[in-house]
Amino acid sequence: MPEIDTGNTAWLLVSSALVLLMTPGLALFYGGLNRSKGVLNMMMMSFSAIGVVSILWLFYGFSMAFGTDTAGGLVGNIGDYLGTKTFLSETDVWGVTEDLPNGIGVPTYVFMVFQMVFAIITVALISGAISDRAKFAGWLVFMVGWATIVYFPVAHWVWGGGFVGAKLHVLDFAGGTAVHINAGAAALALAIVLGKRAGWPREVFKPHNVPFVALGAGLLWFGWFGFNAGSELTVDSVTGLAFINTQVATAAAVLGWIIVEWIRDKKPTLVGASSGAIAGLVAITPACGFIAPWSAVLLGLVAGVLCALAVSLKYKLGYDDSLDVVGVHFVGGWIGSLWLGLFADSSLNAYISDVVGASDGLFAGGGITQLGRQAAGSGIVTVFSFAVALGLGFLINKTIGFRASTEAEVEGIDLAEHAESGYDLSTASGSGAGGAFALAGIAPAGGAPVAAESDGAPVAQQATR
């Protein structure tokens, strides 16, 4: 039995905690971008993903993703790590019983939980496209189906010895294809199935809490170091490369996004800077351990600019992606994946050629071969995820129902689905009965009526919506 490396194990435990923090960060980011009457439902989608996906991953998801390859590279052996088994001293994370092929000495349970938190946030990412109009029960059923049919097999294709990584030789250091393109394609499918929000695009749906957006983006940025640098699974020079690339690419993307805003809208915004950070984090994810820092800066700048422009595509194409999952995660994931076909450099990480059997990028002397591979792998994941999500969404909508009623949407999805609201406005205009009068729009003690919105927020707050 190979000896456990305590340093590598400690790093992966810390990284797992950082990645788990990203999902509450995503809940704040999405919740702030949403309207006040749907903030809780939006955040519940992320928190419920933690509950549902964790259990699925333990019982069969990890086996499907990282079990011994079966069915010609399509899925792992579901019996290898079935949830009824225990692995207290097992240190082989790749599905073989001999010594670890890379000798990192990390217990199976540690690697299992690290990949578990990846699965959680991938599913949660999809929810941003369907805010304000999805039944919570429909979302729960969709999570189970999509995680089982799509995410677990795709994780195997890319990282577990499946055909995308092992046969097509596609590079994906931490999740450009398996996480962001995968989730973005599913988000587009659900946006199509559920249709447009009431009033969209005629009405302007502004973020109700910009500080939430910035706080969520900050937590995501912080956790992403575990997401990217942790994906090396050990502590070495590549870990440091992934770490610094994550920072500089994200910083450049912030600048790229606000430059677009400054030129196009004449004013940079905090929401734009926060969104730019996410775009940079997404784009650097597949490339962080395979490119030089100068290339990471250029990648971040390109991603910030292109994703800022891409979010407007929904208005031209007519799909209501509420919180721009497609424009940021899908487009950003594609940018990062294709970037490897241009700038991947095996002199920085021998894993490119020695383990995956991939080629250097075009500008590193490798020709266009790897660019074609990256496009093929990204395209396969896009089509598969979109098709399955479209089918699942349609089936759920026609059976138990996925789209909430217009009445529930207008009055507030929080009250309709969860019987609670994000903010207690009972004392919004003072203490005691005055607050209640304000909510009802009734003039207290003969004064002038106080106008109220349909979700109970005073008119003074409309500017933030």
Image (spheres, rainbow, N blue to C red):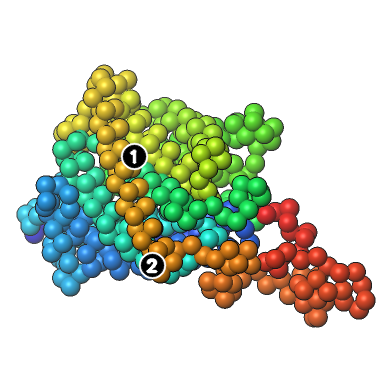
Q: Secondary structure at mark 1?
A: loop
The answer to whether residue 435 is left or right of residue 148 is right
Residue 398 or residue 109, whichever sits in front: 398
Q: Quadrant of the C terminus?
A: bottom right
Please identify, in this view, whether the residue under mark 2 or under mark 1 is nearer the observer: 2
Circle 1 Cα neighbour tier, 10 Å, few/some/many (<14 / 14–19 / ≥20): many
Q: Secondary structure at mark 2?
A: loop
Asked if labels 1 and 2 touch by Cβ distance under 8 angstroms, the answer is no
Residue drawn at x 63%, y 63% as measured from the top left: 410
Q: As shown in the figure, which amino acid type bears the numbered disc 2? A: Thr
Q: As shown in the figure, which amino acid type bears the numbered disc 1? A: Pro
Please identify the quarter of the rendering in which residue 175 is found. Answer: top left
Furthest residue toward left? 98
The answer to whether residue 101 is left or right of residue 286 is left
Residue behind mark 1: 286
Residue drawn at x 81%, y 80% as measured from the top left: 433
Q: Note whether residue 103 is visible.
A: no
Q: CA distance from mark 2 to mark 1?
A: 37 Å
Residue drawn at x 74%, y 59% as measured from the top left: 461
Q: x, y percentage for residue 391?
A: 34, 55
Q: Note whether residue 436 is visible.
A: yes
Residue drawn at x 47%, y 29% as measured from the top left: 302
Residue behind mark 2: 399
Q: x, y percentage for residue 387?
A: 32, 48
Between discs 2 and 1, the one toward the N terminus: 1
Above/below status of 112 relative to 188: below
Q: x, y percentage for residue 282?
A: 42, 42
Furthest residue toward bottom? 433
The answer to whether residue 361 is left or right of residue 271 is left
